[in-house]
Amino acid sequence: MADKTAAKEPLFHIVKRDSLPSYKSWAIRIISVIAALIVCALMTMFITHQNPIDVYSTMIKGSFGSSRRFWMMFQNLAMLLCVSLAVTPAFKMRFWNIGAEGQVLIGGLATAACMILLGGKIPNGLLIFVMIIASILAGAIWALIPAVFKANFNTNETLFTLMMNYVGIQIVSYFTIVWENPKGSGQIGIINQISHAGWFPKIGDFDYLLNVIIVFALTIAMYVYLKYSKHGYEIAVVGESENTARYIGINVKKVVLRTMFLSGAICGIAGLLLVGSTSYTISTKTAGGRGFTAIMVSWLAKFNPVYMILTAFLLAFLERGANEIATVYGLDQAFSDILTGVILFFIIGSEFFINYELRFHHSHKEVK
């Protein structure tokens, strides 16, 4: 007879997997999305009594139902992808840059300042060139501040970069009042609405095609930079182990500063495109939460810029579709946010099954 005092084994235990083939990991992700859609369909039926097929059809129409919606969808995708590209080098280095929101705002503010102060005073081509330089430097310097403190005093970069977001928001709020138009409106309004000074040129009849092309080029450049360049190799080594990096002669402080400068510079480009080629104004909502959503995009794609196109597309589609649901069916915005949250929960949860597996304990009865 078995010893009753023996320790009782658990029903299952969690074991870290060996690396899965790419097709298996993507299969798990696809299954998780399908499961999430089924759960959302059941929630829709029981809570709102709407036909879930109609709801999903509305989501698709909200993103691709017309030419304008199609380009709005790709504009949202491009801007989210741009910010995701910005945070990726820092994250791969294990520098948790939570300040992309503020870096985008400061880059956009620099763009707006050039448009307001220099518009009509210098040739438009020169103005756009100055806007590009100003926005890149503004975003880069804003990201460099926490990097300097991290490199020299080992401060907590998560809290520091998060704090810089709120400082950036307040600076934009101040200049919104300084430049408000008309006075007393509390907003800047469309900058150079008549002269279009500083407005980026359109390609044909497509309002956002230039933005899409620029971000696509940045995606390819970032992929090559991280995978094939010496700097990309140094970022990966520092991310794995700073001690190892120092042992093989890598200047960790230099890598941290250089990488955060790059991260902030790309955020500055995002601010430039949002102000100079999308809304032609600046406000505290210009970044639109992309700095935080980009963290999820980058993490889900395992810091791979090419995979980020897919994850950014999914999140941009969910956002557009959820807003369309709320409008068409007269539902509270909270319900569309719930659907988005459920889908994201399943997607994030799928990463557990990609990295770990459950092994169940099989008990065997003792043979008498």
Image (tube, helix red, strand yellow):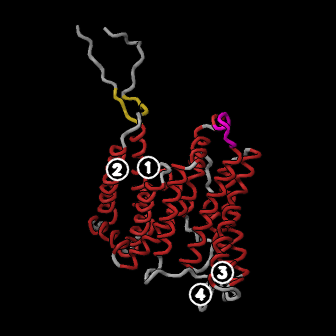
Sequence-earlier tag: 3 or 2: 2
The residue positioned farthest toward the right in the image shown:
153
Q: CA distance from mark 4 to mark 2?
A: 47 Å
| 100, above or below 29, in the image | below
> In the depicted view, which residue is nearer to us: 270 or 356?
270
The residue that appears at 70% across and 83% down in the rendered structure is 118
Query: Which residue in the structure is indicated by mark 3?
Result: 127
Left or right for 282, reference 334: right
Residue 163 position in % (x across, y down): 69, 57
What's the amino acid at mark 2? Ser
- Mark 4 or mark 2: whose residue is earlier in sequence: 2
Please name the amino acid that badge 4 sits on: His
Which residue is disc 4 drawn over? 196
**What is the distance, in whole Å, between disc 2 and disc 1 at their CAs?**
9 Å
Q: Where residue 260 sits: x, y (%)?
A: 65, 54
Estimate how packed mark 4 is, as few (under 14), some (14 to 19) or many (20 or more) residues with alpha carbons within 10 Å. some
- The image shows residue 83 at horizontal and vertical percentages of 55, 62
Quadrant holding the N terminus: top left
In this view of the protein, which residue sits in the foreground, 35 or 2? 35
The residues tagged by marks 4 and 3 sit, at their Cα atoms, a distance apart of 11 Å
The residue labelled by disc 1 is: 348
Disc number placed over residue 32 in the picture, else none: 2
